[in-house]
Amino acid sequence: MAIQIPRGTQDILPGEVEKWNYIEGVAKSICQNYQYQEIRTPIFEHTELFQKGVGDTTDIVQKEMYTFKDRGDRSLTLRPEGTASVARSFIEHKMFGNPNQPVKLFYNGPMFRYERPQAGRFRQFVQFGVEALGSEDPAIDAEVISLAMDIYKQLGLKNLKLVINSLGDKESRIAHREALINHFKPRIHEFCSDCQNRLEKNPLRILDCKKDRDHELMKTAPSILDYLNESSKAYFEQVLSYLDSIDVEYEVDATLVRGLDYYYHTAFEIMSNAEGFGAITTLCGGGRYNGLVQEMGGPETPGIGFAFSVERLIAALKAEHIELPVEYDVDCYVVSIGDEAKSTAFKLLHDLRTAGFSAEKDYLNRKVKAQFKSADRLQSKFVAVLGEDEIKQNKVNLKNMQTGDQIELPLDTFVEEFKKLAY
């Protein structure tokens, strides 16, 4: 029996991977315009990092992590998200001492979560994210949100909805926490075991529960917006004012939460409203995490970031029937006729590639007609024909595959002459 791919993973084949490269290229280019620099962290880290950095009460840590012991009996985990690794690197390499602050980073790479595979969700998935560490300015919150929206818009998505909320500062969070406990406690036995465990540890996580989301107490739960102190209200109003100034549309949603203790102030999600996209509409999630670096052993450092799944982005593009401007064609296909012409054709092929052109030739000893068919399948713009006669006469027959026009070019200066035609 043939070995098959593990459940929840996928092969990204030629013809599709070019779309991924294009998307990642657009995202990286926009990050660079915003002065965010790329960081690459290990695919696996010490398990403790994610227990601290993601949170013991989260589904990710409790149910979804790929954790294993290495030969030194150390507990390691395949990274389920990127923020914790970035924060660890920020501390370990003392980036808080960099003269340029805030430290603005982006990452792109595979993440791993053991969850039920479904449309747009995989056990190995690619996540693109940004983190801005070192600033408490509401403007950086608006910048991070704007950056995420710019990526989606530049790729052509139109059916987008930005949802935003404030979780307040520590004082506001404590007041809201007590209100949530008092609200849910009398009837907590009606909720799932996860919610019952969360009541005292992290009641905000109850609002994130998928099993009990239709319970009547969910609809009447105390809103964080009613518990914001004056400074938290002012911070949130400033963030919204910055978004208004750059014409970023948003919807304030008091039910949007980030259930970790170190999340404060701004929380946001970007959703797709495209018809047929599916029940799970979230494309991107982010927020401010002022206590994360300190929780992991670093100095008190404010931060904000977001992350999105490239798989879900591709699904949104398909839902809106957006074709990315990806080129698959070949600049020049070199056809050789006869054994004598093979070595000359191979050298010409190499010269074309060295000059920066996409070029190909036949490697199956096919007839001339079959070679031209191969060039046509590869959508080659030109075909260069070399036979014994051409070599003797120091020339190459060049055919424009779009117009059908044919010309002769000197063999020894072919590449230079071809540049004039191709450009």
Image (cartoon, rainbow, N blue to C red):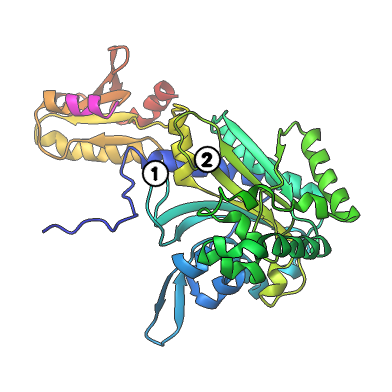
Q: Residue at x 74, y 55 (%)?
A: 167
Q: Quadrant of residue 82?
A: bottom right
| Rendered location of residue 341, percent (x, y) | 15, 34
Picture layout, residue 26 above or below residue 227: above
Counting residues from the start of the chain, the first of labels 1 and 2 encountered is 1
Q: Is residue 140 left or right of residue 279?
A: right
Tell me the residue at 48%/35% (across/down): 316
Q: Quadrant of the C terminus?
A: top left
Q: Is residue 381 above or below residue 145?
A: above
Considering the whole magenta stretch, tell me its main secondary structure.
helix
The answer to whether residue 396 shows anywhere in this view is yes
Percent across and percent down for residue 81 are 53, 61
What residue is shown with label 1?
119
Which range is magenta?
A: 372-379
The part of the image, by quadrant, that contains residue 112 is bottom left
Residue 139, position in %: x, y? 80, 47
Is residue 377 found inside the magenta-colored segment of the image? yes
